């Protein structure tokens, strides 16, 4: 059985690994790619990064119900699920509202890649720091396997 912590770690790992090809393609501080690969256009690295990032999407979207069932009592699960689902959509909305302010010219695209890498790194640290289950199960259905 796959635990939520492992699923979250895999998703965040995919996002972190997906940020690397963007830096390879865009370069960390220069206009040239960090690791030029003969015959491979930089856009290929961006495509690989997007595929790795999008592979985590179904797991992240499906995890909302599992997290609310594990961490919240029956009376709060609907609200917790709704808030988490809407927070995901709000994040996408804010990205599209803020992106034009961050990227004024093509050279600023590196800043977006750095923000993505920093955000994924912070979330990965939080994932490692938070417990997999609450100390006390909020309901009988939230009781994890192996706990009486």
Image: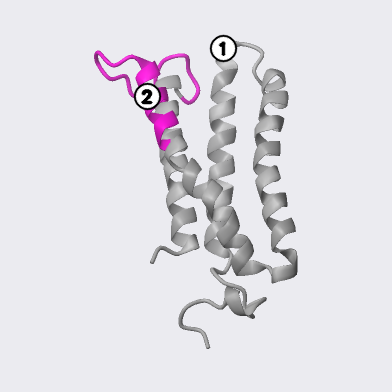
Residue 129 on image: x %, y %: 57, 63
The residue lying toward the viewer, choosing from 5 and 65, is 65
Mark 1–mark 2 distance (CA, rounded to whole Å): 17 Å
Residue 26 on image: x %, y %: 45, 20
Graded by Cα atoms within 10 Å as few (under 14), some (14 to 19) or many (20 or more), the crowding at tag 1 reads few
Residue 106 image label: 1
- Indicate the secondary structure of the residue bearing disc 1: helix
The scheme the figure's colours follow is one colour
**In this view, 9 is above or below 42:** below
Residue 115 on image: x %, y %: 59, 34
**Residue occupying image coordinates x 72% and y 50%:** 83
**Residue occupying image coordinates x 59% and y 54%:** 64
Mark 2 or mark 1, which is nearer the start of the sequence? 2
**Residue occupying image coordinates x 57% and y 72%:** 133
Instruction: Give the left or right position of residue 41, taking residue 20 as reference.
Output: left
Residue 1 image label: none
Instruction: Give the left or right position of residue 23, taking residue 99 as reference.
Output: left
Query: Is 38 part of what is drawn in magenta?
Result: yes
Figure quadrant of residue 21: top left
- Range drawn in magenta: 28-52
- Indicate the secondary structure of the residue bearing disc 2: helix
In this view, which residue lies farthest toward the bottom? Answer: 148
Graded by Cα atoms within 10 Å as few (under 14), some (14 to 19) or many (20 or more), the crowding at tag 2 reads many
**In this view, 137 is above or below 67:** below
Query: Is 83 part of what is drawn in magenta?
Result: no
Figure quadrant of residue 50: top left
Residue 45 image label: 2
Instruction: Give the left or right position of residue 103, taking residue 42 as reference.
Output: right
**Residue occupying image coordinates x 59% and y 75%:** 141
Label 1 vs label 2, nearer the camera: 2
**In this view, 31 is above or below 29:** above
């Amino acid at each position: 059985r796959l635990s939520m912590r492992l699923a979250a770690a895999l998703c965040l790992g995919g996002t972190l690994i997906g940020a690397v090809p963007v830096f390879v393609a865009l370069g960390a501080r220069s206009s040239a790619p960090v690791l030029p690969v003969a015959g491979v256009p930089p856009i290929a690295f961006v495509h690989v990064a997007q595929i790795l990032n999008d592979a985590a999407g179904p797991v992240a979207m499906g995890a909302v119900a599992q997290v609310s069932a594990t961490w919240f009592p029956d009376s709060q699960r609907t609200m917790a699920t709704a808030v988490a689902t809407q927070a995901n959509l709000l994040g996408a909305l804010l990205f599209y509202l803020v992106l034009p302010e961050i990227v004024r010219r093509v050279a600023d695209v590196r800043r977006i890649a750095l923000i993505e890498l920093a955000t994924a790194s912070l979330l990965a640290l939080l994932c490692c720091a938070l417990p997999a289950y609450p100390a006390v199960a909020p309901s009988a259905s939230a009781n994890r396997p192996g706990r009486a």
